[in-house]
Amino acid sequence: MQPHFGFVCALFGSVITFAFGIWPESLTLLLVLMAIDYLTGVIAALREGEGLHSNTGFWAWLKRGSCFSLFCLPTEWTCSSAPI
């Protein structure tokens, strides 16, 4: 199982690097803050006794994905040497 996980991680990293080029520190900060936001949301839902709902989680991930995309696309356009 371990070699397959390493292969998947390497493949994912290669695709991300190819798609977005250089990985800026601001993108790392965005991902860390998004992870903290998600974890605190899960902790708050469990603490309030509401439990976890897949519908709420879906919309949370969709929001984070759109935020990530909106940050990555302009970064790729400005770093690319090809004309738009």
Image (cartoon, rainbow, N blue to C red):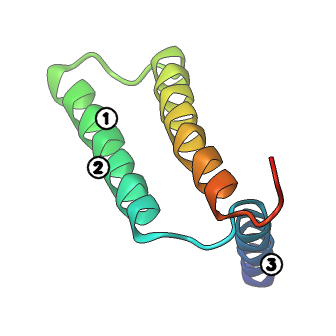
Q: How crowded is mark 1: few (under 14 residues within 10 Å), some or many (20 or more)?
A: some
Residue at image coords 42%, 64%: 28
Q: Distance between the residues labelled 1 and 2?
A: 10 Å
x 79%, y 84%: residue: 3
Q: Which of marks 3 and 2 is in front?
A: 2
Q: Is mark 1 on a helix, strand or loop?
A: helix
Q: Distance between the residues labelled 3 and 1?
A: 29 Å
Q: Along the polypeptide, which appears first: circle 1 or circle 2? A: 2
Do residues under tags 3 and 2 come within 8 Å of each other at their CB atoms? no
Of labels 1 and 2, the one closer to you: 2
Q: Which amino acid does label 2 sit on?
A: Ile
Q: How many labels does the image show?
A: 3
Where is the N terminus found, in terms of image quarters?
bottom right
Which of 34/17 is in front? 17
Mark 3: amino acid? Phe
> Which element is circle 2 on?
helix
Q: Residue 36 carries which label?
A: 2
Q: Name the residue under label 3.
A: 7
- Give the percent coordinates (x, y) of residue 58: 55, 24
Q: Quadrant of residue 14?
A: bottom right
Question: What is the secondary structure assignment of the residue under circle 3?
Answer: helix
Vertical relation: 57 (above or below) 3: above
Q: Which residue is drawn at 29% across and 41% down?
A: 37
> Quick check: 18 left or right of 52?
right
Using a 10 Å C-alpha cutoff, classify the residue at mark 2 as few (fewer than 14 neighbours), some (14 to 19) or many (20 or more).
Answer: few
Q: Which of marks 3 and 1 is nearer the N terminus?
A: 3
Relative depth, front residue between 14 and 60: 14
Label of residue 42 in the image: 1
Question: Which residue lies most toward the left here?
Answer: 48
